[in-house]
Image (spheres, rainbow, N blue to C red):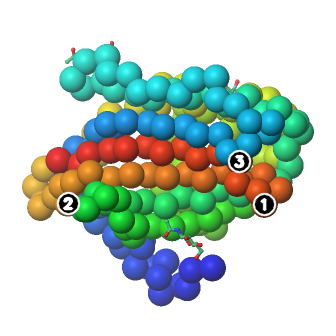
Amino acid sequence: MISPARLVQLSIFLFTIHLVICKLEFTNIKCVTLDPEFAVFHYCFLKSVNRTYKYYSLKVKLLKTPVSNVKINIATFQRLNGYKPFLYNVTVDGCRFYKHQRSNPVFSYFFNFFKDYSNINHSCPYDHDIILDKVSISHANTQVTNVLPVPHGNYLYRADWYAYNIKRATVDVYAKIY
Ligand SMILES: *[C@@H]1O[C@H](CO)[C@@H](O)[C@H](O)[C@H]1NC(C)=O
Ligand SMILES: *[C@@H]1O[C@H](CO)[C@@H](O)[C@H](O)[C@H]1NC(C)=O
Ligand SMILES: *[C@@H]1O[C@H](CO)[C@@H](O)[C@H](O)[C@H]1NC(C)=O
C-alpha cells in the first residue's frame, strides 16, 4: 500500500503533468497473453488515421468465465538506456475498483484514459470479451497547455492483468511526450 504522503506527492505530480504535457502521442502497443488457456487477444493494434487522430483498439477473449477475481498493476517507465521504472507502480483490485474509483486517484487517472472506450464499465464478474475500442489520446491533449516546460521523452505504460492472483496478460502502451 502507498503511504498518504506518497499519494499526496503523486497527486501533485499528476496535477502538474496535466499542466506541463505539451502533447502525448501513442507510438506502439503490444499485448501478450501469458496463459492462452485463460485469455487470448483477438486483436491489438495502433492506428494512425491522420496526424492528429491516432487510436488503439484491442479485444481479449476470456476463456474461463465468469471471472470474479481481478487485479491490475499499472507501472510507468521512461526510456533512458532501455525502459526504467518511472514514478508510478499501482495495483488495484479490479473487482472493487469500479465501485470505489475515488479510493485510488492514481489508478483513476489511468482508467480515465480508456474507460469511455471500453466495456469494462461494470464490476465483477466478467463473463464476456473485453474490448477497448478506438482509445484516442486527443481528448487528453485538449486539456493541456504549451506554456510550461515539458518532460519530453518516451514512456511505457504497462498494465499487468491478474486473475485469481496469476498473471494472465500484459498490455504495453508506448507513448511519446513532446
Ligand atoms: C483526422 O481524422 C479525423 C477522423 O476522421 C477527422 O475528424 C479530423 O478532422 C482529421 N484531422 C485532420 C487534420 O485531417
Ligand atoms: C511494482 O511494485 C511491486 C510491489 O512492490 C514490485 O514487485 C514490482 O516489481 C514493481 N514493478 C516495477 C515495474 O517496478
Ligand atoms: C457499458 O458500455 C456499453 C457499451 O458501450 C453500454 O452498452 C452499457 O450500457 C454500459 N453500461 C454501463 C453500466 O454504463
Residue placed under numbered mark 2 in the picture: 151
Which amino acid, by three-letter code, is at mark 1?
Answer: Asn
Residue placed under numbered mark 1 in the picture: 165
Q: How many marks?
A: 3
- Identify the residue shown where x is 88% and y is 36%: 65
Which amino acid, by three-letter code, is at mark 2?
Answer: Pro
**N-terminal-most mark, 2 or 3:** 2
Q: Which disc number belongs to residue 168?
A: 3
The percent position of residue 12, horizontal first and vertical second, equals 36, 73
Provide the secondary structure element on which disc 3 rests.
strand
Above or below, comparing residue 69 to residue 142 in the picture: below
The percent position of residue 7, horizontal first and vertical second, equals 49, 77
- Quadrant occupied by the N terminus: bottom right
The alpha-carbon separation of the residues under discs 1 and 2 comes to 35 Å
Q: Quadrant of ligand 2?
A: bottom right
Provide the secondary structure element on which disc 1 rests.
loop
State left or right for residue 99 relative to residue 75.
right
Q: Is mark 3 within 8 Å of ligand 2?
A: no
